[in-house]
Image (cartoon, helix red, strand yellow):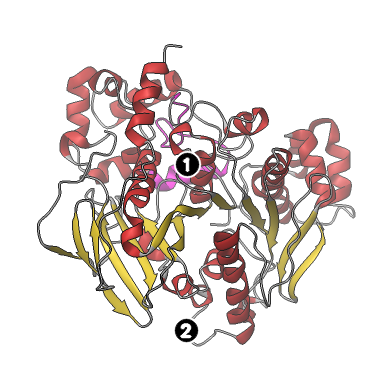
Amino acid sequence: MRPRMSTALLPLLGMLALSFSPSFAAPPARATDLTLAITDTGAVRGTVEGDVVAFKGIPYATPPVGPLRWRAPQPVTPWAGERPAAEFGPACPQSTPIPQSEDCLTINVWRPLAADAAPRPVMVWIYGGALVAGMASATPGDALARQGVVVVTLNYRLGRLGFFAYPALWQEAENEPKGNYGFLDQQAALNWVRRNIAAFGGDPRNVTLFGESAGGGSVLTHLVSPPSHGLFVRAILQSPAMPSPRANITSLSEPEAAKADALLYAKGLGVAASGADGLAALRALPAARLLSSTRDELNALVRGETMPGFPGPLRDGLVLAEAPETALRTGRWNKVPVITGATNRDIGVGQAKTKAELFAYFGPFAAEARRLYDPTGTESLDELIQQAFADRTMVEPTRHLADAVRRAGQPSFLYRFSYVAVSERAQVKGATHGRDVAYAFDMPQLNVPPGKLAPADVEMGRKMSAAWVAFAKTGGPNGPGLTHWPMHEAGHDIILNFTDAGIRVEPDPLKARIDLWEKVQ
C-alpha cells in the first residue's frame, strides 16, 4: 500500500492475570513419533515436509461465533483420538477474497524433523494488515524451522470482529476484558504455546515474539500488557504500528469515545436498538456486513483520519492500560531484549495538498524541514509526502523504541531494511512497507515473480533470517558468517542497514530528518 497522502480495576486485573497467567505445569508426554504431538486438548497428527514437520490448523480457542462473537477467547473442548493437522485453518473474516470463517482461531507449528535432546527456541509470528487483514498461512515457517527453531503462526480476529466497543458488551461480560478481542486471541495463543510447545520439541521458557506492521504493533502491545508478562523473553518489531511506539501515531481509542463510535456505526448498519437487543441484532448480522467499509476506512487511516467505529486498539485498562509510549517512558513494560527497525521507503500516515501544508506539520521547524527534505525546491510533492510521513510514522518511532529499550537496560538492536530484489531495482526506489517480511522468513521468492529470483536475493534472505534466528537462540543477532551487529546506544545512531550492496553497519543516513521529527513528535 503506497498512499499519495500519505484501585477499582484491581479485582478485574487479578481475574485477568489468573486467566492468562503463565504455567509451567508438566507438559503432556512427548510422542516418540515426531509427526504426532499430544496437546492438552488432544493429539494432533502433522505431516512431513522435507526435513520439517508441519502441524497446521490446531484450534487454540473455541470458535468465536454466535453468542461468543465479541467475547474473550474461550477454552477448546478436548477431542478423542488423533486430529489431522495437515491443512491451514481459514483466515479470520476480512475484505480480502480468501477462504475465511469466524471459526478461525487456529495455530500452526513447524519443527525440524530431526529429534533433539534439548528443547528448541520458539519463534511466534504475528502478521500485519492494519488489524483488518492478514492470515497466518501467508508466511510458512519451514525455512526458519530448518535453522533449528520451532516456529508458530496464529490467526486472530480482525476488524470489527476483533476490535469493537459496543456498550452492551460491558454489561454482558462484566468480568472479562473487552474491546481488544484480537489482542486477547494473541494472548490466548501465547498461553497455548506456554502449555503445549514442549510437545512439539519447543522450549516454553525461550519464546521470541515477532511481527510486522500491525503485527509489530501487536508485539508492542504485549511488551506493555500486564497479562502478557512472562509469555516471551525476546521481541522483534518490524515497522510497528497500531499501536505505535509514538502515542500520536495511530493512537489508542479512549473507551467512552469508542463506545459512542460503535453505537453510531451500529445505527449505520440499521441497528437502532441499544443494550442487549442491539447486541443481539449485531451478532445476527453476517460477518461480511461488518467488513463492507474496510477499504474506505484504510484509506482514511493513511490520511490520518478515522471513520465511526473504526476497528483499532482500545485503552481498555486491562490489556492496554496506557499508551505504549507512556509505559515505555515510565518503565511499566515487560522488559526483554528487542530488535526493531523499518524499511527505507516505509508507509506514512498523513496528508498534504501542497508543500506548505506538508511542512506545516513541523511547526516552528518548517524552514529546517525544507532544508532537509527539499533543499533545492525541486522535489515533487509525492516524493516529499512519502519521505516525510514514512519518517514520522515508522522510522523515527522505531528509533524512539530502540532508545527506550536501551535506556531501560535491555539489549536493543536497530536496523533499516533498504534491500530491493534484483529484478525490481529498475522500477522502484527502495524497500516499501512489508518487503522485509519475506527475507526475515528466508523466503525471498515471495517478493519476486516466478523465475526472477537472483542469488543476491537468496543470500539476503539467508543472512537476515539467520540474524533473527540467532537472536531467538541467544538474545543477540550475531553468529558465524553474519555482519557483526552492535547493540544500539541512544544518541549514537549506528544502524545495521540491509542494502543492495550488502549488510552494512553505518551511521544512520536519515539521522538529521529523524532528529527533527523527534522534536516534533
Q: Residue at x 59, y 30 (%)?
A: 332
Q: Which residue in the protein does label 2 denote? A: 450
Residue 472 screen position, x and y as percent:
55, 60
User: Is residue 501 inside the magenta stretch?
Assistant: no
Mark-to-mark CA distance, 1 and 2: 42 Å
Tag 1 residue:
230
Residues marked 1 and 2 touching at CB (< 8 Å): no
Q: Point out the residue furthest to the top here.
A: 7
Which is in the foreground here, disc 1 or disc 2?
1
**How dense is the environment of label 2, judged by Cα within 10 Å: few (below 14), some, or many (20 and up)?**
few
Note whether residue 189 is visible: yes
**Does residue 500 lie above or below 437 as drawn?**
below
Q: From which residue to which does the magenta span run?
A: 293-317
Say what amino acid the circle numbered 1 marks. Answer: Gly
Q: How far across and how far down the image is residue 348, in percent?
A: 63, 48
Q: Residue at x 72, y 34 (%)?
A: 521
